[in-house]
Image: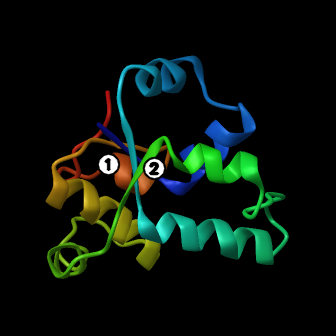
Amino acid sequence: MLNLDTHILVAALAGELTVKERSLISKESLAVSDIVLWELAKLVQLKRLVLDMDSVAFRRSLRYLTIIPITVQIARQSTKLDFASDPADELIAATSIVERIPLLTRDRKILKSRLVPLAK
């Protein structure tokens, strides 16, 4: 299983993954932290992303994802990371740590982490 951060999910929905990202995603089941859904909604609200979250196509794409809820363990782990970022990115990274699921991300801060299991 792979945990996708928000930008990777957006790239996947837009067909804009790199060859390596596409290869990794094609071999694994996929998950996202539930905060990713909130980030998508905020990006749409701020007009930084055009996405109809009510569309049948979008809802169908969610069927391929395991949505991982934020637990107390994840919330606590998000305060013990070896990097500082926005709260959503910290929760996404903490989800990978707690659930032991490699994270697929392009985020430079997270990629430097020694704690977060990263997709390779």
Q: Are marks 1 and 2 in contact (CB under 8 Å)?
A: yes
Q: Residue at x 24, y 80 (%)?
A: 75
Q: Quadrant of the C terminus?
A: top left
Image quadrant assignment for residue 90: bottom left
Q: Residue at x 21, y 72 (%)?
A: 74
Expressed as whole percent of the image width and height from the top left, the position of residue 54 reads 75, 64
Expressed as whole percent of the image width and height from the top left, the position of residue 26 reads 46, 21
Image-based side of 22 in relation to 52, left or right: left
Expressed as whole percent of the image width and height from the top left, the position of residue 97 reads 18, 56
Image quadrant assignment for residue 80: bottom left
Q: Which residue is mark 1?
A: 112
* Label annotation for residue 108: 2
Mark 1: secondary structure: loop
Q: Amino acid at mark 1?
A: Lys
Q: Nearer the viewer, residue 56 or 96?
A: 56
Q: Quadrant of the N terminus?
A: top left
Relative to 74, does residue 96 appear above or below in the rendering? above
Q: Nearer the viewer, residue 19 or 57?
A: 57
Image-based side of 107 in relation to 118, left or right: right
Mark 2: secondary structure: helix
Image-based side of 8 in relation to 78, left or right: right
Q: Amino acid at mark 2?
A: Arg
Image-based side of 79 in relation to 109, left or right: left
Q: Residue at x 36, y 34 (%)?
A: 29
